[in-house]
Amino acid sequence: MRVFRPACADRSAGRGPAGACAKASDDPRARSGRFSLLTVTTCVSVQLSSTPRPRLTREDVLDGRQVADLLHMPISTVLEYARRGLLPARKLGRRWIFLRDEIENAVRGQPGDWPAA
């Protein structure tokens, strides 16, 4: 019988928050020799989501008009670039919103969390 233990279940190694994941030996699938990758994925997502994110302020969130003013281009071009994925944006209902940090990173050419087209 093979027993699989996720890295975050090892409390002695100091990885991850204590108790964030159950040991694989506690899982009935581990005892039967079938261990799901889903448990490992869930374990990793618990660790990644525990990092606090800074709160957004009004200065961080821009609309199309503000981005157009910032980049000195027409609003229609900014919205078209957002539709194509050339500018990082999110659509909420009928509105496009932009995050200032993501726009600055895109203009500077730094990799970010948005897909480059």
Image (cartoon, grey):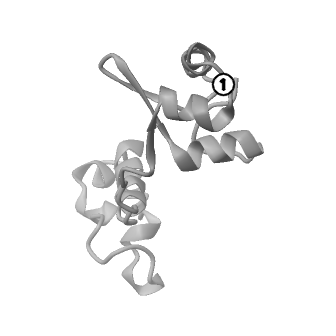
Q: Is residue 23 left or right of residue 60?
A: left
Q: Quadrant of the C terminus?
A: top right
Task: Name the quarter where the N terminus is drawn.
Answer: bottom left
Residue drawn at x 40%, y 76% as measured from the top left: 10
**Amino acid marked by disc 1:** Leu
Relative horizontal placement of residue 78, taking residue 37 as reference (left or right): right
Q: Position of residue 6 (x, y in %)?
A: 43, 63
| Residue behind mark 1 | 86
- Total of numbered circles in the picture? 1
Residue in the foreground of this view, choosing between 31 and 92: 92
- Residue 75 or residue 112, whichever sits in front: 75
Quadrant of residue 18 in the image? bottom left
Q: What's the residue at 45%, 50% (across, down)?
A: 60
Classify mark 1: residues with Cα within 10 Å, few (<14), some (14-19) or many (20+): some
Tell whether 104 sits left or right of 64: right
Outermost residue, bottom side: 12
Residue 56, how many percent across, how many down? 37, 54
